[in-house]
Image (cartoon, helix red, strand yellow):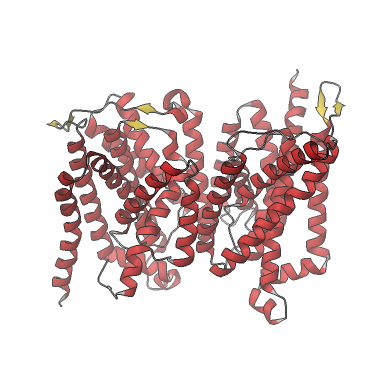
Amino acid sequence: MDFGPYLLLASLEGAVMAAVLALTALGLSLVFGVMRVVNVAHGEFFMLGAVSAWWASSMATNIASASPALAFLAALVLAPLITGAVAFATDRFVLRRLDYQPEATIVATIGLLYIIQQSVLMSFGPDARPVAAPFNWRVDLYWFGYSGYKLCVIVIALSVLLLAWLALTRTRAGLIMRATQLDPDMAQAFGIPVDKVYAGVFTLGAMLAALSAVLIVPTQQAHYLMGLDPLLMSFIVVIVGGLGSLRGTLVAALLIGMSDGIISVFFSPTLAKILATLLVALVLVFRPQGLFGVKPR
Amino acid sequence: MTSTVKNVLVVALHAMVPLALYFTYPWISEYHQNNLGRILILAIYASGYNLLLGYTGLLSLGHALYLAAGLYGAGLATTVLGFGTLGAFLIGVLSATLLASLVGALALRTTGVAFMIVTLMFSQAGYLTILYFNRITRGDEGFVVPRGDSIGGLPADIGNADTRFIIALILFAVCTALALLLVQSNVGRVWRALADNEERVELLGYSPTHYKFLAFVLSGLMAGVAGAAYALMFAYVGASFATIQYSIFALLWVLVGGAGVVLGPLLGTGIMFYLVDYISELTSAWLMFVGIALIILVMVAPRGVLGTLRHKLDWHWLP
């Protein structure tokens, strides 16, 4: 293959990566932005989404003998719900009792990381398991055929991102979330149930991670250790974009996802991750608050 | 009690711990003797972490990087460059210290949660770098470091378990003395003040960045001492020491024993070493237990064992 088509292939891989990364990082960024909680277990919510997707789709195939498309649909609905339920319980029984102090919640979510990961190891086992894509179209791009499903992932992820942006900026729920983010005490004084907002945001953040996992799992496999990579990549995205800035998260996800995809295709995935981390260092030297972050007072 | 008498008693208490271990050693089984050597070395790593978390109030999630720098510095100096035990040890410590200075200078530009994430990222970059150069480092598999038979010209059979224990004990005693000296000095007072109220420290004319940097580099140095000693004494270097898990272990050990207590890391490392040893015989998912321990600690006993004792019994003199 010539350089041009090869670059196109790499860019497509990068675009898939960027779209899913944006969705995962949006969850992390929302939780951090509104609650000031760094959720180290975010990657495990992603993994839980992928494993639940495997569980839901194989149940649908084995018991109801559903078609791949229907089985995938079952996964798309059930996996975020299961993950959301775990996140809701975490907020209620752990984070709320810690009063959302930043350092205590970091230690607690590290603990949660191991609990989720090892529970999945005990129930799901150490093997990687595939989830079938809902359809197997190939789009002919003249030089090579490309998976129609991957293109579809880009479209779905972008639509969800657009929806999230509209919900945050144009709806009453979004207004309440932004008010809580700006000043939780004042929001409480105006009758906003801050506890419920926190529970909702934490659940929503986990569901976004689970949703991106369901979207990407047909192109990878579900495995109990798969959560670390999305966690670190999301961390890079929110740091580079600026903690708590939604626009920064999207721009950084595009930048890092694309370059990660392209470098992975041309060189090696390990090198791509090392370079992304060094980018964090560079950003911090010149803009400690991130590309779009606001300087702390 | 005058402050001089108090100081003498505090030093005597801390000197008694290595002495007590020295006299207990012949009475315990070979299995526990071996464990004790490892616990002492790992406790040095945790003591360094304690300077940063317990006294200065900085939560790093990437200290495995400096442990690994010590391990690989000493290991590669032995196998690739052909250094003797003492030379390899010094190279290990130096690599960890230099790396900690570099990362510290960058990471300390951020504060709060960004600092935690950035330290985590750098340590992950270090881990990936080890995997990337797997022709030299042998990646996850790791490599064996031949044990020397002398240290700086003096004969010392590191293959002998008793000799290893004495070396571990001496290193631990020196590092504990250093930690005690630091936290009792003016530097230690500024560190504790930084953890309480950084703005006020700055207002009083101290530079918070300088003191934080010093704490960061010293804790990296101690991680390097532990790493280099581990590689040379236990004859193995592998990428697993550079994983996030080892950074979290440092946090766990310090929290269990008591953050901000000089003897806390040894107690925490000992307790967790034996608990994990026991649980991993029962289940392969022993890390679940680490997770549960972290959540229980942070919800029920955030001060750890010695920190809770100091608080409940009003032992303000315990540094």
Question: Which residue sits at x=76%, y=49%?
Answer: A78
Question: Which residue sits at x=66%, y=71%?
Answer: A195
Residue A292 seen in this snapshot: no
* A175 relative to B65, above or below: below
Is A50 on the left or on the right of B102, as rendered? right
Q: Position of residue B272 (x, y in %)?
A: 37, 51
Is B204 on the left or on the right of A159, as rendered? left
* A296 relative to A225, above or below: below
Residue B47 seen in this snapshot: yes
Q: Where, by quadrant of the figure, is residue A8 drawn?
A: top right
Question: Which residue sits at x=34%, y=39%?
Answer: B70
Please give the count of numbered marks on the rendered protein.
0
* B177 relative to A56, above or below: below
Question: Which residue sits at x=16%, y=46%?
Answer: B27
Q: Position of residue B319 (x, y in %)?
A: 27, 66
Residue placed most toward the observer, B194 or A101: A101
| Residue located farthest toward the bottom when viewing the structure as drawn | A189
Residue placed most toward the observer, A109 or B24: B24
Q: Where, by quadrant of the figure, is residue B55 drawn?
A: bottom left
Q: Position of residue A153 (x, y in %)?
A: 79, 40
Q: Quadrant of the N terminus of chain B?
A: bottom left
| Residue located farthest toward the front when viewing the structure as drawn | A63
